[in-house]
Amino acid sequence: MTAELTFPARASLLTTVRNYVVLTKPRVISLLLVTTVPAMVVAAGGWPGTWLVLATLIGGTASAAGANVINCWYDRDIDAIMRRTAERPTVTGAIPPGHALTFGVALGAGAFVFLWATTTLAAAVLALAALLFYVFIYTMWLKRRTPQNIVIGGAAGAFPPVVGWAAVTGDAPLAAWVMFAVVFFWTPPHFWALSLRLENDYARAGVPMLPVTNGPGYTRAQILRYTVMLVPVTLLLGPAAGLGWLYYGAATVLGAVFTWMAWRLWRDPSSQRPMRVYKFSLLYLGLLFVAMGLDGAF
């Protein structure tokens, strides 16, 4: 009798926890954190210490999670229209809107306090700035108003390497902001490749993503344009951060492949699917920052 009463309660608790985790968009967070640790290694000129790395990752995860939860709370009306997001707990009612907002704000505030206590005030402020930028500039202002939403709003996702650097040194020099620029210029081709696949979804929801407002052809041209601009920015990081041949070699080869794929997508879309470019962009960023960290460590 006791077991029968306990089991459903436990299942319900696990389901609730899972729903809250879904709102944090863990896949998005994992991508952002890939850029944090290599930046810390470069800033420290080696391994900055396991506790400092863990503290920065925990605080950065909580801050990004808070931003994502608030995004889900605010966008629940258009999320209900899009197939990709129609099952989010804020849409289905599994998580009440007020609970979601409270959870997101608590994560963001907790992250600020935690980063300040365990790393540096600069890292805490930068993480909070990223959250506020994502929520107020991208989610509430740009996303529904302009096809340049992801260009400007994507800056929020470029903060993690700057946060990582600041967690080590307490400041953010030029090298940290060049890392910011790398992620900033990488974001449009990465996201627009995905938006080509989701064009109909965005059109139904009335979100002015570039393929909806300007068409797939123009979007493919912009993917190539931003990829071409990205490559020299990655090479500028070498002198800015004092990196050597390992990073230069990786940035050159990866940049050439990314540019070639973007060129094929623009020139002959029948031979290059947008999702292949999207998936390679994920690999590109990960390998680029791994090479950066390895070069900075040795």
Image: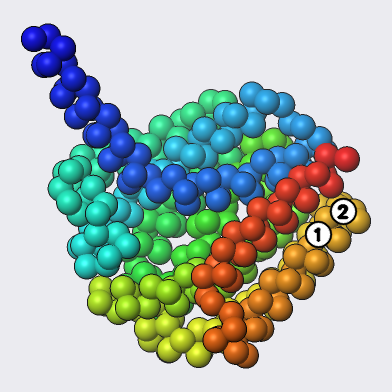
Q: Is residue 98 left or right of residue 171?
A: left
| Residue 25 seen by the camera | yes
Judging by the rendered image, the residue that carries numbered circle 2 is 246
Q: Position of residue 80 (x, y in %)?
A: 21, 62
**Residue position for label 1:** 250
Query: Which quarter of the rendered picture does the N terminus lie within?
Result: top left
Q: Quadrant of the C terminus?
A: top right
Mark 1 vs 2: CB contact within 8 A: yes
Residue drawn at (52%, 75%) of the image: 274
Tell me which amino acid carries mark 1: Ala
Q: How many marks?
A: 2
Left or right: 185, with 58 as reference point:
right
- Examine the rendered structure and indicate whether residue 296 appears above or below residue 17: below
- The Cα atoms of the two marked residues, 1 and 2, are separated by 6 Å
- Examine the rendering and report whether any part of residue 173 can be seen: no
- Mark 1 is surrounded, within 10 Å at the Cα level, by few (under 14), some (14 to 19) or many (20 or more) other residues, namely many
